[in-house]
Image: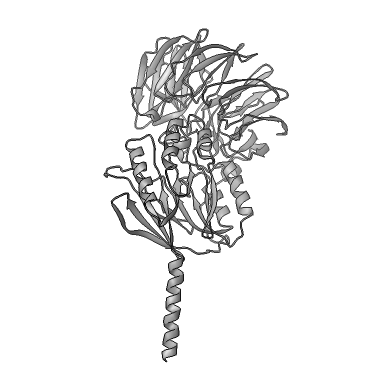
Amino acid sequence: MKRTLLLVCLGAFILVQVRAQSVWKFAHLSDIHVGSEHSEEDLQRTVKDINANPELEFVVITGDITEFGADKELLNAKSILDGLNKPWYIIPGNHDMNWSESGGNSFKTVFGSETFAVKQHGILFLGTNCGPNMRMSPGQVPRENLVWLDSVLKTTPKETPIIFANHYPIDSALNNWYEVINRLKTRNIQLIICGHGHSNHHLNFEGIPGVMGRSNLRAKDTVGGYNIVSMVGDSVFYNTRLPGVVTKPTWTKDRLYDHHFNGSGKYVRPNFSANQRYANVKEVWAVEDNSDIGAGSAVAGNLFITPNTAGWLTSYDTNTGKKIWATRTGGKTYSTPCVSGKYVVISSSNKNLYCFDLKTGKAVWKVTSDKPMVASPVIKGDRIYCGSSDGHFKCYELASGKVLWEFAGVEGFETAKPLLYNGLVYFGAWANHLYALDQKTGALVWNWTNGSSNRMFSPASCYPVATANRLFIVAPDRYMTCIDATTGKVIWRKQDAKIKVRESMGLSADSSLVYVKTMDGDVLGISTKADDMQVAWTAQRNIGYDISPTLVEEHDGLVFAASNSGIVYAFNRIDGSVAWIHKVSNCLVNPLSFIGDKQLVATTMDGKIVCLKY
């Protein structure tokens, strides 16, 4: 009896010792927002606190490192994080990528990567970017990150436990959440950690345990905070830590184990049934890129030319989708190419404006700016007009790239395509300004501001339109503004709770309407002649909540609106009735390219290129 009792006690002692040996900890830090109030002080305090805790072995940082994705903010964050005395692994968030003056290029330059894969205690930690990248929409793990994830999982044994990190929750807040979930479920995924919500939450992602970690910002408190994550045997425990003050009691815990997902269970997935209901719309050809496509495209004869975020500019045959040529810039590309004669011009986040031969794709010339270029060029005659992120807007000679004039007074940076109208060039920038310059000299004619101190309300992503000396813009402050194109004086400016405009607009074929797409999913035509925001046309179907800046365009008697969930809507111009609907993807549709004979090419943020005949 004593021998049995001794063995039981010895077994219990050994079990306790084994479990004690398997206890290890790391810090989960998120939503630092360097550039916002108190952010640097809060981060410095957190770094000092983590360094003083020898139990913490490493740090995982799940996005929104900066407030606005600015190079200065990224460098400041890196300088503070370099003070950590233990390894740290970092991914970007929407604030680092959506308003980035470098098109997200600087994040990779400063931190070395936008993904990570590292093993700790036999567990594989994986992290990916989630955007949205330079175009407002729900989040999305970039196509190139999915390709990267495939390559990592391919070489990962199925029994290896995985903890996946992302800034957004892996649910419908991401347009392609299901692509991530489906991949992770082929392996031993045990936990998903994220940020974005700024508060602690215990989540569940289709049977996978999830934890959202709080922001490092203090908010209404006196200090910021982070989470200490304790791995105890087969369980995970989360405790909020207020640096230099207290470690709070465990607020959530979960068991980690191999769920052996086998495809069982029914979960919501994107619905493509509209493509059967409107079967008259046919896909002529389709191509899938290995990277995101974050800009519009160009058509010249039988060539369709599109960029991607890996820096490639590719030309396809409009009839077959066959690749004709491809050439690469040195950085992520969010610029819509512009074609004139034998030239195609595009900017890149590697600071260069490029001119390529239209037939061969060979470089003709390139001109370098002081900072990245994420705006789109426009060509008129022998001149190119394009802005950059260095506070300059320039006019270049088409044949040589020679700078003919430059305006150095831009506050913020440009991301859209400028408008050429009545001898002036108009463009918005991410500092709440709209500029009008003389096309010949670059002289400032007028400079309008919305008066806001919040850069995120800037009229920088919409493509301005003009008619009858009236210039129209929309912006994230939900105002629509009509401005005298010559003087810059406001004719009318309105914010309407029932018409929540944002960044999507376009001009009708007869110039009588400015089309707008509202956040609530209405597609409307606003009169260009009225003295107020007067609705003169309404699409007879709501497209659902939508925040994408994609142009609303009119062709062949149809009004085309594209959504941030991969759908192209075509409405009859006469009465607003639905002509057809086609779902290409579940991610943002870029500006459409019309190639004649009732055909168009649609590209999506997740790299799909589809030619439709309607």
Name above or below for residue 353 compared with residue 146.
above
Viewer-nearest residue: 376 or 161: 161
- The answer to whether residue 541 is visible is no
Q: Residue at x 50, y 36 (%)?
A: 110
Give x and y (percent) for residue 232: 43, 64
Query: In the rendered image, which quarter is residue 155 located in?
Result: bottom right
> Vertically, is 309 above or below 274?
above
Total marks in image: 0
Report the quarter where the N terminus lies.
bottom left
Q: Quadrant of residue 318?
A: top right
Is 278 in front, or is 127?
Answer: 127
Q: Nearer the viewer, residue 90 or 57?
A: 57
Classify the position of the C terminus by image quarter. Answer: top right
The relative height of residue 172 versus residue 307 in the rendered view (above or below) is: below
- Name the colouring of the figure: one colour
Residue at position x 60%, y 60% from top? 158
Task: Determine the residue located farthest toward the top in the rendered image.
Answer: 440
- Residue 466 in picture, x, y percent from top left: 47, 16
Residue 368 visible at all:
yes
- Residue farthest along the bottom direction in this orientation: 1
